[in-house]
Amino acid sequence: MTETVLELRGVSKSFQKNLVLERIDLSIQPGSIVGLLGKNGAGKTTLLKCALGLLKTDSGSSRIFGEDSWDLSGETKARIGYVPQKLSFFAWMKVRQMIAYHAAFYPRWNDRLIASLLSRWELDPEGRVWQLSEGQVQKLGLVLAMGHEPNLLILDEPAASLDPQARRTFLSALVEIAGNDQRTVILSTHLTSDLERVASDIVLLKSGRVSYSGSMDELKESVKSVTLTTVRKWNSAPDLPGVLRSEFQDNHAVFTMKGVTDEMINVLESKYDATAEVRDLTLEDIFVEVHRV
């Protein structure tokens, strides 16, 4: 039986009177790269911290590898890697000392992977932490989170300060980690182009609630731009299911729609005596349209 990596049931979290998460239900299975996408303030960081047991939920339950997130065993913690938005290291240490210190907490540590990442990201093991740039600090955080080859790797905006070449190396490393079907990556980022390259699944978070959770391919297959061209002008907007946005000009109508199927298109063409043109959307297009409504 496949072990569920992360399971949230009815999770809510408020800070004072500000409701940040509202009845979140989420289940993550092993062997996937899951993209967590939402606007600033949608609750992404709070969700990740509740999932990890770094914040206590107000209601509901959060479990990692079957254990309560608020009371994880040392064995389970050793299976998790985490890179927060803000990193803090011992500034006086050398990079190699910081790595050795971190490695001492884990029963398993891949020195070969560490050496490879240091080389590819041009991190000097003899350099002092206080001398590192913001991007280099972020690289070091990723190195430390990946070194024990965690079964669950949670990354909160990990590539924000990385240059394009470093981001490409980072994404390659994620794919290598998730290549083992017992490993899972949860990646929170605003870089939709990165998610399109590596994510197998997407979680859309809107105003503290999950608006979509599932396959990236299914999401992109379902949400489309549909242009209907009729013989006569549109006098009023048709009542259609799943419309996120609509625009009208003379005899052209452009809809961004959820749940688009071949059967739906055939019905629209017949009902409105129109010809339909269906266009695929990028993940960024879909994200923007979902958050218009």
Image: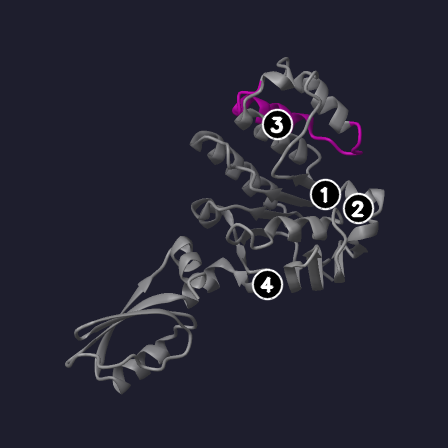
* Residue 118: in magenta span: yes
Residue 47 sits above or below residue 243 on the image = above
Secondary structure, mark 2, is helix
Say few, some or many: other residues with alpha carbon within 10 Å of mark 3 (under 14 / 14 to 19 / 20 or more).
many
Q: Which residue in the protein does label 3 denote?
A: 140
**What element does badge 3 sit on?**
helix
4 or 1: tag closer to the N-terminus:
1
Instruction: Residue at 74%, 46% (x, y): give it.
Output: 54
User: Residue 100 appears in which quarter of the rendering?
Assistant: top right
For marks 3 and 4, give the CA distance.
32 Å
Residue range (magenta):
104-123
Residue at mark 2: 76
Residue that mark 4 sits on: 209
- The answer for how far apart the CA atoms under marks 3 and 2 are is 23 Å
Q: Mark 2 and 1 residues: CB-CB less than 8 Å, in contact?
A: yes
Q: Quadrant of residue 244?
A: bottom left
In this view, 217 is above or below 176: below
- The residue lying toward the viewer, choosing from 170 and 192, is 192
Q: Amino acid at mark 1?
A: Ile
Give the image's coloring scheme.
one colour
Amino acid tagged 2: Thr
The residue that mark 1 highlights is 80
Residue 114 pos. (x, y %): 64, 27
The crowding category of the residue bearing disc 1, from other C-alpha atoms within 10 Å (few below 14, some 14 to 19, many at least 20), is many
Kind of residue at disc 4: Arg
Q: CA distance from mark 3 to mark 1?
A: 17 Å
Q: Is residue 243 left or right of residue 142?
A: left
Kind of residue sitting beneath label 3: Leu
Is label 3 or label 2 in front? 3
Question: Which quadrant holds the N terminus?
Answer: bottom right
To which quarter of the image does residue 68 belong? bottom right
